[in-house]
Amino acid sequence: MNRLLSLKGKIASIMSILVFTSIFSYSSHVYGDGQLTETEELDSLTVALYPYVPDLERFEKAVAEEWATVQPDVALNFVDWDGYSSDPYEDLDVFVFDAIYLSHFIEEDYLMPLTHDDIDESTDILSFALDGVTVNDHVYAIPQIVCTNLLYTRADDSSLSEVSSVPELYQKVGPRQSSGIIPEHGEGLLIDMSGSTTKVLMYLDALLDTTGVYTDYDVLPELTHLNRSALKSLIMLQRMAGAQQSNYWPDNNDPYIRAKWFEEGYGKAYIGYTEAMSSMGDFANEVNFKTISLSNTTDIPVFYGDVVGINSAITDEDKQEVAIELANVIAASDTLVDAVAPDENNPYPQYLLPARESVYDKLAGDYPIYGELKGIATHEDNKLFKMGSDARPWLDEAKPIIAEKLATKASKKALDYRPAIK
């Protein structure tokens, strides 16, 4: 599911999240009557959900209501924690994080290993997602949401119906012609590449499609000589969008502003996460969407994973059992249905991609788009996007390098680049 700090776009900040360096200073709110105490009795668990979703409150409410039927005497202390910025705090019991950091968290011993028997209805979980969090027969997190970029086109625009790759899209759309942030009606590409993390992860995605071989990036690529074909994919995207628009982030922190522009007729195509449809209203029923390759040779569909981990700092066996219960509730089918479906304050689903097949079936009756999304989420070639244990330092090194490359290329003429990757 953004992922990512433009994300879950998936990445520039989707919402204002306070992250503090002290383990005692992060903000929290409690569901239930209990409080953490110095006694042996377990009154509450501290939990952090993945923050970069359209409506975090719906997730917290769904988890709290389902948890009340399982463990009514154990309160949930929800806290704000951003896994992109810091490792888990010692007193953070259960937390949802992006699977790109799975290997890092395993290496640093932040995660309590589980067995398949610990996972409720494990056969319902998307197989590629469960495989991705399983290392040496240990399950280190429970998949909750997956996320990938889709190409959105208007249903009445037949000119893009056969497009399946960035080079093909470039041949149809061409370099941006208008100036300014918002393109003209039916012209250019709408895409958010504003986050430095986004740029790096898109480069790794393009590298997979370029080489045609999936890797979990246990060994991350060297940065002294970037792969020219993979980099050219990002350059094409930037040229179709225009450097100003592709790097634009709104003052109101609306992560789905481009989806709204697309609904209003601006841009010929839009690339974004599935949850962007939550901002399109009924127009979501008037668009076609599909995964898109960043190469003209192969497509390895990789998905970011929001996965539920349990802190290995928990040593008390009784508390471990309750924490496993909570992790299962967070990733449960009924919880996810309630979290992504409309409620009294939201007329449209969140259009996230749950990591359980049953959720798609439960939602598709009222929201047919979920029938289409199930086909995307269950494709046999899908893989989980992962990075090696040195993900943090590698990202810190890669972000300015790739950002500088794209900024340099943005100043050159579009005609210097052919639409096909060589």
Image (cartoon, helix red, strand yellow):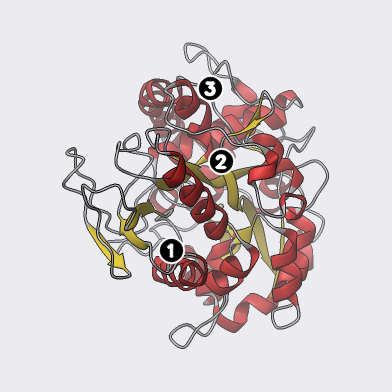
Between marks 2 and 3, how big is the CA–CA gap?
Answer: 16 Å
Give the residue type that dot 2 points to.
Ala
Which x, y percent locates residue 14? 37, 57
Residue at 21% x, 56% y: name it: 27
Looking at the image, tell me whether mark 2 or mark 3 is earlier in sequence order: 2
- Read off the residue under disc 3: 388
| Left or right relative to 353: residue 11 | left
Q: Residues within 10 Å of mark 1 (few under 14, many from 20)?
A: many
Judge by depth and name the residue closer to the eye, 335 or 213. 335
Give the residue type that dot 3 points to.
Gly
In the rendered view, would you say 25 is above or below 136?
below
- Read off the residue under disc 2: 141
Looking at the image, tell me whether mark 3 or mark 1 is earlier in sequence order: 1
Judge by depth and name the residue closer to the eye, 353 or 264. 353
Q: Residue furthest bottom?
A: 344
- Read off the residue under disc 1: 182
Judge by depth and name the residue closer to the eye, 161 or 138. 138
Between marks 3 and 1, how big is the CA–CA gap?
Answer: 37 Å
Residue 194 in view, yes or no: no
